[in-house]
Amino acid sequence: MNLIDKQLKEEIVKAFKALFDFELNTADFDLQPTRKEFEGTHTLVVFPYLRHTKKGPEQSGEAIGEYLVGNAAIVSAFNVVKGFLNLSIAETAWIDIAKTISMADTFGNFEATGEKVMVEFSSPNTNKPLHLGHLRNNFLGDSVAKILAARGHEVMKVNLVNDRGIHICKSMLAYEKFGQGETPETTGIKGDKLIGNYYVRFDQEYKKEIEGLIHQGSDPEEAKKKAPLMLEAQEMLKKWEQGDEATVALWKKMNGWVFDGFDISYQTMGISFDKIYYESDTYLLGKDIIQEGLENGVFFKKEDNSVWVDLTADKLDEKLVLRGDGTSVYMTQDIGTCDLKHKDFAFNKSVYVVGNEQDYHFKVLFTIMEKLGRGYADGLFHLSYGMVDLPSGKMKSREGTVVDADDLMQEMFDTAQKQTEELGKIEGLTENEAEELFRTLGLGALKYFLLKVDPKKRMLFNPQESIEFQGNTGPFIQYTHARISAILRRADSLEIDQDFDATKVGSLHPRALDLIHKLTEYPKVIDNAAKDYSPALVAQYVYELAKTYNGFYQEVPIFNEDETDVVKFRIAISASVAKVIRSAMGLLGIGVPERM
RNA sequence: GGUUCCAUAGCUCAACUGGAUAGAGCAACUGCCUUCUAAGCAGUAGGUUCCAGGUUCGAGUCCUGGUGGAAUCACCA
């Protein structure tokens, strides 16, 4: 909890009790930050309480303000504007808080809640390489997992790999027909890229066949179904399901190449998982649950033997959950996997990081789990994020308008290198250090760019303009950290520690007060970000913190000061800012350099 | 067509969940490097929050109806 807020709210509760004999609860109200055109840092809006105070807004504010200044040590002044009571906190209180934050080595971390949360994200198909959309998914999932862990939950990151199905067979078939035995080794092409090429190749050849058939007089719908390649792909899928040796061997070989390729991409992204599920293992799950649902009336059977759920009462439609021939659909295995996940981890919450085009699917899935009487059903949550659009519109893999994840990251590294060299900032770095720096900056810029936007919203990515390194960006925040690191190195060499005497700090510079105020907000930011599953809140906060620090840095010289406790104090709050920047950026999966 | 989501400065995004005169960055313009990193700081300019009603002390935020856009409505995943 926010250190100042908590104390202040308790004092306000006392004030209501003493002045109006009214029991206010600290959980029932929130303080707002005071707008900067007014004096003070915390604002209580009194309008909602007028029926308890039985006075006008101004008089109520005055009364509470006077009480607080008289009775609460941390409140030094107040003013009332209309129904807004603006409060100023005593400088000594700010300095004490600064001391507390400075001494804490895990500021912002919460105690263990005992709650278990599973976060599923990434979930790639093994028929094509990762693209920009996957990057948003991966960065989001990874960051949300870190935020939930910081909030005190036990977190399990899982990846459900879609490694089977008709789309996989398409690239297998194209490879068999046109591949001539080439491999990642013989071609020098990354495994996932190689397979992706064959997926595209299938589509091209398939289209040719369709056109041919239409030319011969078939109607388009029929041509799509009758095209020999499609029939062959379906035949291959059957063989795979029957465990045909050659088919399974080919599948294993090609998926192996893809996984090797993915491993490289994940490593570049800095992303890992606690557990990986493969659909080839889970695609048969769920059938027994369908049976269970039939028995207790959740599902019903139609004449053709197919199994359905009727959700019209829940404002959803009827939905198929098992085909007439007894084979699974997407929903079948998701029902089964849902149960499997709970058996494996016994989560209180299970988060699915999946794009918003599947909103309907998850509504249906969660409703079904509820109807099946799964006790954990209310802990299921679809983190539905918006698509990433290009200036040209939506990304289409078949039209070649996708932004490849590996290429994009490499471009970011190159841009970082160019910028750094232009600014002449690689002096004194070894080649390895420089290389690492480019990666930290490039990846930081990219992650920050994708995470600073509210996950729910669709966003625009303009590769033309590349990604900025100035303003509200990852490198801006990293730069602030590097600057503070320089100060800490100097303090170290001058042998000045951070153990200031709070009574000797004297009066606070407004910039220092702003900075401490900002620092105190960090725990609340983590709490909100965890509640909303929103890394954007952390991104925005850490930007504001860096900006606030840069203002302080510009106006307040750290070392040019006679009183050593003042110097120590300035170093201490600088160090606290660096600590929070490192921590917050860490929650976004972004590293911070010591120099740049 | 049904359902769901979205619309805020020229552009990309915020707005603490109903609070004060709607804020940042980019782009444009003006200043600041012999003192701790100028990837920075300070400032100027930029708005009928898509439109019309409603709810109340107060609406970008909630409700209704429009307009424009997106997703989804498969025995695909």
Image: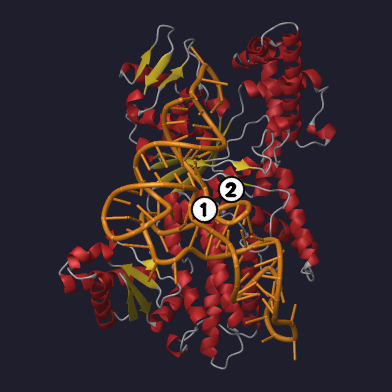
Q: CA distance from mark 2 to mark 1?
A: 9 Å
Q: Is residue A316 left or right of residue A137?
A: left
Q: Is residue A393 left or right of residue A453?
A: right
Task: Answer above or below: position of A149 versus A394.
Answer: below
Residue at (22%, 65%) from the top-left corner? A50
Tell if the residue under mark 2 belongs to the same chain as the one under mark 1: yes
Q: How is the image coloured?
A: secondary structure
Crowd class of label 1 (few under 14; some 14 to 19; many from 20; radius 10 Å): many
Q: Secondary structure at mark 2?
A: helix
State the image coordinates of residue A502 (x, y, percent, origin top left). Answer: 44, 85
Task: Answer above or below: position of A141 versus A1.
Answer: above
Residue at (59%, 16%) from the top-left corner? A241
State the image coordinates of residue A230 (x, y, percent, origin top left). Answer: 68, 14
Can residue A60 be seen here? The reply is: yes
State the image coordinates of residue A79 (x, y, percent, origin top left). Answer: 33, 78
Residue behind mark 2: A139
Residue at (40%, 41%) from the top-left corner? A347
Quarter location, residue A14? bottom left
Pointer 2 with pointer 1, Cβ within 8 A: yes
Q: Residue furthest bottom?
A: A562
Crowd class of label 2 (few under 14; some 14 to 19; many from 20; radius 10 Å): many
Chain designation of label 2? A
Q: Tell me which label, 2 or 1, sits earlier in the chain.
A: 2
Chain designation of label 1? A
* Residue A535 circle label: 1
